[in-house]
Image: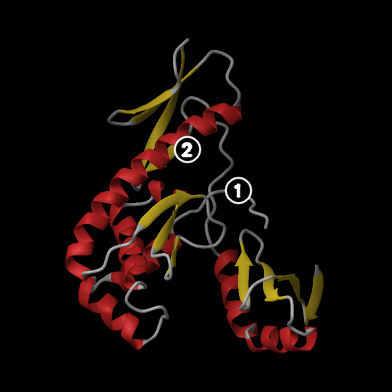
Amino acid sequence: MIQLTLGNITVDVVQKDIKNLHLSVYPPNGKVRIAAPLRMKPDTIRIYAISKLGWIKKQQKKLAGQQRESPREYLTRESHYFLGKRYLLKVVEENAVPKVELSHKQILLFVRPHSDKNKRQETLEKWYRERLKEISQQQINKWQKIINVSPNEFSIRKMKTKWGTCNIESKRIWLNLELAKKPEYCIEYIIVHEMVHLLERHHNDKFIAYMDLHLPNWRHIKSELNKLPVSHVDWEY
């Protein structure tokens, strides 16, 4: 890995067997990374980075102002979120298969006695993943009839910088596991956004026209989603 210094911004550059340049700004501290093709000369990469300085600074400013959740210890009476609503966690120890149940005001986390933080986190995240998959499938079923396009597959995973992404060629959509904590209309917005990419790859006028047609209030939802607190996890790449 090599590093470029552009004023007070350091850019990590990793060259790989890929076709195109990929620029990312990572939470929580705004680290900048460029993945570049093996054949590309350092001067070409530097020129590209300089051309993107305005965008990099904008993303770093947005990350600096973004609320972050405090670290979670997975203890009773700790706050956790599901579909935008705050719940108090109640840890229940029993000699049975770990599971999660949702009550009116509580998330009940059933774990074996003496389970550690990692096991509790794993159990809760598995539940989040299952619920998000159910909700996402319902939304995809709804919108594929409206947009008249259908992904071949979708999956849930932890993602570093995006709420969702789409592989146009394979027609596969990935959704950020953190979406399980956000209001359902935010999940719907991300799904519509990624499905529209199956009609238009780029965020151009055509893409915006599709979004305006199918989800007229998408700008408001996008703004709200990006203001909501995000996980405390200090992601690295």
Q: Three-letter amino acid code at disc 2?
A: Glu
Q: Going 72% across and 83% down the picture, which residue do you hit? A: 45
> Would residue 109 be seen by someone viewing this image from the given angle?
no
Name the colouring of the figure. Answer: secondary structure
Residue annotated with mark 1: 233
Q: Going 81% across and 73% down the picture, which residue do you hit? A: 3
> Would residue 130 be seen by someone viewing this image from the given angle?
yes
Give how far across and how far down residue 10 sits, in percent: 76, 73
In this view, the residue farthest toward the left is 145
Horizontal side of 181 relative to 49 (left or right) equals left
Give how far across and how far down residue 33 sits, in percent: 68, 70
- Quote the CA–CA distance across marks 2 and 1: 14 Å
Q: Going 35% across and 72% down the picture, which residue do you hit? A: 198
Q: Is disc 2 surrounded by few (<14), some (14 to 19) or many (20+) residues within 10 Å?
A: some
State the SS at label 2: helix
Horizontal side of 232 relative to 219 (left or right) equals right
State the SS at label 1: loop
Where 180 sits versus 150, above or below?
above
Residue annotated with mark 2: 125
Q: Nearer the viewer, mark 2 or mark 1?
A: 2
